[in-house]
Image: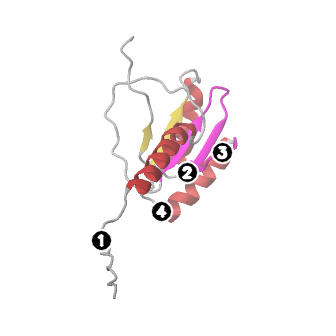
Amino acid sequence: MERRRRRKQMAEINVVPLIDVMLVLLIVFMITAPLITQGVRVGLPQADAEPVESNDELTLVVSINEEGSYFISLGEEEDPQPVPLEKIQEDVNKILSQNPEVPIFLEADASVNYGLVMSLMAALADAGSNNVRLITQPPTAEN
């Protein structure tokens, strides 16, 4: 009579395939992250300023590109369309009436006329915003 040997069950998990999958995902995210752009392309002016701490709250970004067109995006709108200044004032007024704590960020191209920036800030003030934050780039070593 032959005795059958019982196989001892293995209590280990092979993690090598999981590591392979994680490395592939890491590479995919490293490649795609720089390709994802938000909002309007603007050549921001350089200034030595303190960075604003980011949090997960909803933000309103108003932009002026180098052609002088105005844009508005709430949250993570991917492809904002140019809008007239009056429409921005109406939209900001509606947003602030629903949630007055929404932070407003203004980004303008460095080559934009100062008058366009001031007219936008005046429109934002007329809409009820009392705290507009300006977005800049940190200075480079060349300057």
Q: Which residue is mark 2?
A: 76
Instruction: Tell me whether circle 4 and circle 3 mark residues in contact (CB < 8 Å).
Output: no
Earlier residue among tags 3 and 1: 1
Q: Which residues are magenta?
A: 59-83
Q: Which residue is mark 4?
A: 99
For the residues marked 3 and 2, what is the alpha-carbon distance in whole angstroms?
A: 10 Å
Earlier residue among tags 4 and 2: 2
Secondary structure under tag 2 reads loop
Earlier residue among tags 4 and 3: 3
For the residues marked 4 and 1, what is the alpha-carbon distance in whole angstroms?
A: 55 Å
The residue depicted at 65 percent of the width and 45 percent of the height is: 80
Q: Give percent across and percent down for residue 60.
A: 51, 49
Looking at the rendered structure, the kind of residue marked 3 is: Pro
Q: Nearer the viewer, mark 4 or mark 2?
A: 2
Secondary structure under tag 4 reads loop
Query: Magenta includes 135?
Result: no
Residue 11: assigned label? 1
User: What secondary structure is the magenta-colored segment mainly?
Assistant: loop
Earlier residue among tags 2 and 1: 1
Q: Residues within 10 Å of mark 3 (few under 14, many from 20)?
A: some
Q: Give percent across and percent down for residue 61.
A: 53, 45
Looking at the rendered structure, the kind of residue marked 4 is: Asn
Q: Give percent across and percent down for residue 120.
A: 57, 38
Q: Which residue is mark 3?
A: 80
